[in-house]
Image (cartoon, rainbow, N blue to C red):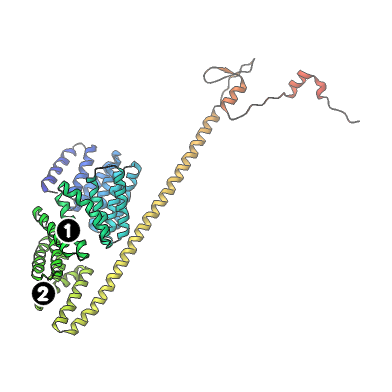
Amino acid sequence: MPNTKLIMLEKKLEKLKSEPDNAELVIALNDISLACIHSDPQKAKKYALEAYDLARVLGIMNQQAKSSLLLGLFYLELGNFAEAESQCRTAMQIYESLDDKNGIASVHSRLGNIFLAHSQIDTALEHFHLALKKKQECDVDRKKLASFYFNVGVCYAELDRFELAISFYEHAKTVWEESGNRTHLACLYHNLGTVFSKKEELENAREYYQKSLDISKEMGDKRIFASALNNLGTVQNKLGNNESALDCYAKSLDLYEELGNKRGVAHSCVCIGRIHTKLGHLEEGEEFIMKGLVIARNLEIKDVEILCLESTIDLYEAKGDLQKALTYSWKLNTCEEEHLNEKSMEKIAGLQVQFETEKKEKEAEIYRLKNVELSRMNDQLRDTLTHVKKLQGMLPICASCKKVRDDDGYWQQIESYISDNSDAEITRGICPECMIKLYGEGLFREKLPT
């Protein structure tokens, strides 16, 4: 977001702070949190927490949920997946209580991003599909569905299910090309280039990477431009265009250094080193590969370190130094085992978090159902007590005819009153005293034994 817009939001916020219990203040706090989530994450967290507390006090539940979702995004940026998921689950509970389908879709989408970053692709795909389904239930314009199709496509691409990935990307592509959404198109074209590169359809891959380059250059998006350049270099390398590949890698290296993206620097270095090795420029190749290896090791970027070690083995084999090649082969085996163990531990940790979260949700649901049943029983008891109280206290009865006066002042036969105000059923009979009065004492004289 441009700085000018951020400045405008901050000015608006200052004006609203003169009325601290204002609902507009909550909205402004969330808006500014979203605006600076990438540029200043700590500021974004501060505003989201402030918005959450004020929304809770004012009872603005949808904004409270939005604040939780923003906090989830903050923790996702930090790589704290457990806390990010916890914040999203909080938002989900609120949105579900409001039956807010748009909000529920947003939470599923964010959960998908969390699991995608955690390399739990199947779980991410499940959430993205749920987000798309929930959004479709809102009967929204198809323009608003494009990003949801895109996310599903990303998961299918990660799972190497390329045809499905292309199918979902095409849905998003049609919408964004019609609307002229250049920012999203730059990213989409880049992803399509990657899919076609994996499929070894190199001309298609080159075409889409070039489209991404053109748009990102026009818009000044150096992050996408650097990535597209690096990937285009890989395509040119596969096509045997070594000089073009070197040119792409060198430009992407400059951009990554400018952006401070160490991972990008390491990857571009090893790619440049591999081309030099291929061309027989072994000293240049060693310089770049070693530079990439040092960065990857210092930052513990195992996948890039593996690529560097593989390139180092090829380099020393080309130089005829088989002892060094063997040494780096051992290092490569160790690194691959460590990388595999890390991935396994990450997956186990992610599954543990998911299990604990689902366990808490089930316990909360059981508690809620128990409360519902208890409330129902209390209501029944209250009704019963109210009913019983109708037959308690002073009951006016006529001294002559024995009629009863009800709460409205009307006189009723006592049988009618009891029937109307209790569950008792009236049956008729004659007591012994009345029996004597009506039929005489002879009826009740006991028969003496003979």
- Residue 223 sits in which quadrant? bottom left
Counting from the top left corner in percent of width and height, residue 253 is at: 11, 65
Label 2 packing within 10 angstroms: few (<14), some (14-19), many (20+): many
* Horizontal relation, residue 87 to residue 4: left or right: right
Query: Which residue matches tag 2?
Result: 276
Up/down of 185 relative to 333, above or below:
above
- Disc ID at residue 287: none
Q: Is there any visible trace of residue 108 in the rendered image?
A: yes
Lower position in the chain sequence, tag 1 or tag 2: 1
- Residue 388 sits in which quadrant? top right
- Residue 322 sits in which quadrant? bottom left
- Disc ID at residue 190: 1
Counting from the top left corner in percent of width and height, residue 302 is at: 23, 69
Up/down of 22 relative to 129, above or below:
above
Residue type at mark 1 is His
**Under tag 1, what secondary structure?**
helix
